[in-house]
Image (cartoon, grey):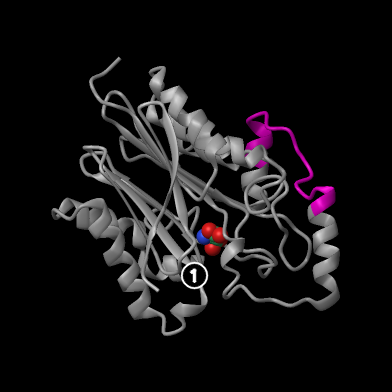
Amino acid sequence: MGNFDPVCIATWSFPNASRKAGELLTAGATALDAVEQGVMVEEADIKNTTVGRGGAPDREGNVTLDACIMDPSGKAGAVVYFKHHTHAVSVARKVMEDTPHVILAGEGADQFARQQGFKKEDLLTENSRDAFKEWLKTKEYKPIINIENHDTIGMLCLDSQGDIAGACTSSGLSYKMNGRVGDSPIIGAGLFLDNEVGGAVATGMGEAILKSVGSFLIVELMRQGKSPQEACEEAILRIIKQNSNYKEFQAAFIAINKKGDVGSSCIQKGFSYMEYRGGKNVNFPSKFYH
Ligand code: ASP
């Protein structure tokens, strides 16, 4: 065991995921194993309608997952428009470890997953199929506002060796256009870390997060001396400056530095994050702008 007190933080209120990762870290697991296994809890939970199996489909009924993972050495892997396997994060890890690439998309990502022994699954559940049928009656497409419907899990872990890893996994916006990829699998936007500095991860309106390259920005601001809290607030301000309609959507970041200090900021009231530290698994309301 190393000398650091391990910490896990994760977007929203997913206590089972942060507990899983936190307990693993306490038992001496690496940050990389902890983030993977932590977010897998939500990927497998079919009650969660925006992560993994059970995630809401696009407008044509396809469930398409986006996920990425980064390890302390700066290696990264991602899958986008990924259709047939629950554990997108594990396939992203395989992309990172077993291919010369960072991102695999669509059919190629699914083919790679099958080659790696992942079982092909139908990601549309009875509930998500019923909800989709209901949605088809009006076909109302409102990615804006929809603040409650953001449940991407982004997680950062600091392990007992003092190393940081991160993961982010999502089925993206409900009833998005076929082919849409969000911020969650994009290194620098949905997730970024530098093991010398810290890490950041995002949830909310992917288009706004992509345009701000927010997670990268937060890590760079922390490198320049800002606390995780100050850095998250600055990234939210950039999004507000860039988007005159900011009152209509949610965007949120959480961040951690090498000392284990944590920060979080978002546009709208209502975002919270989990923190597992010293055996305690707590949900904290985030600071918000609006
Ligand atoms: N960031 C995700 C996306 O835009 C959605 C979310 O966090 O709810 O795909």
- Residue visible at 49% across and 62% down? 270
Tell me which image quadrant ligand 1 sits in: bottom right
Residue 252 point in image, percent of width and height: 42, 61
- Residue visible at 32% across and 40% down? 74
Q: Is residue 105 visible?
A: no
Nearest the viewer among 170 and 110 is 170
264 relative to 59, above or below:
above
- Residue visible at 45% across and 71% down? 208
Residue at disc 1, secondary structure: helix
224 left or right of 159 in image: left
Q: Is residue 160 visible?
A: yes
Residue 65 point in image, percent of width and height: 63, 51
The answer as to whether callout 1 falls within 8 Å of ligand 1 is yes
45 left or right of 186 in image: right
Q: Which residues are magenta?
A: 111-127
Nearest the viewer among 238 and 76 is 238
205 left or right of 116 in image: left
Residue 124 point in image, percent of width and height: 78, 50
- Residue visible at 79% across and 44% down? 122
Task: Give the labeled residue for mark 1.
Answer: 207
